[in-house]
Amino acid sequence: MIVGTLGTIYGTDPATQSMTLQNALRQDLTPAGAMALLVFFAFAMQCASTLAVVRRETNSWKWPVIQFAYMTEIAYFSALGVNAVLSRLWR
């Protein structure tokens, strides 16, 4: 999913359109940023159908909202920590 998204983003940017995706990412993304991105996508709630099933099973929006919020928070702060630690190590 992330490769397709990044391909779309870089494909619409006139400055990087002539570059391959790999070269464009090497230019714009540090190794620490790449690891943080991977950690974020590992923890983030990416499946809307899962939220829909939880909504249907609980008959409430409370639990899907809680699930989405805490997973996004975990993903964000984990990625922030990974980026901070690795940025200091690779200085």
Image: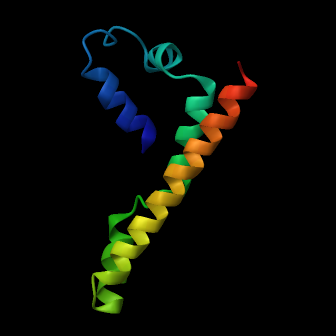
Q: Residue, x 69% and y 36% (percent of image)?
A: 85
Q: Is residue 19 depicted above or below 4 in this figure?
A: above
**Residue at the outermost right position:** 89
Q: Toward the viewer: 19 or 83?
A: 83
Horizontal and vertical percent position of residue 63: 37, 81
- Residue 8, quarter of the rendered image: top left
Depth check: 56 or 64 in front? 64
Give coordinates of residue 41: x percent, y percent.
Answer: 50, 49
Q: Is residue 22 above or below residue 59?
A: above
Does residue 16 appear left or right of residue 71 in this picture?
left
For the C terminus, the quadrant is: top right
| Residue at the spot 34% in from the left edge and 91% down from the top edge | 58
Count every numbered label the image shows and give the total.
Answer: 0
Residue 57 against residue 70 in the figure, above or below: below
Q: Report x, y in % for residue 35.
A: 61, 36
Please name the residue shown 49% across and 13% down the image. Answer: 27
68 over 81 or under it: above or below: below
Residue 81 position within the rendered picture, expressed as x and y whole percent measured from the top left: 62, 44
Q: Within the image, what quadrant is residue 43 found in?
A: bottom right
Q: Nearer the viewer, residue 63 or 57?
A: 63
Color scheme of the displayed model: rainbow
Identify which residue is drawn at 34% across, 73% down: 65
Q: In the picture, which quadrant includes the N terminus?
A: top left
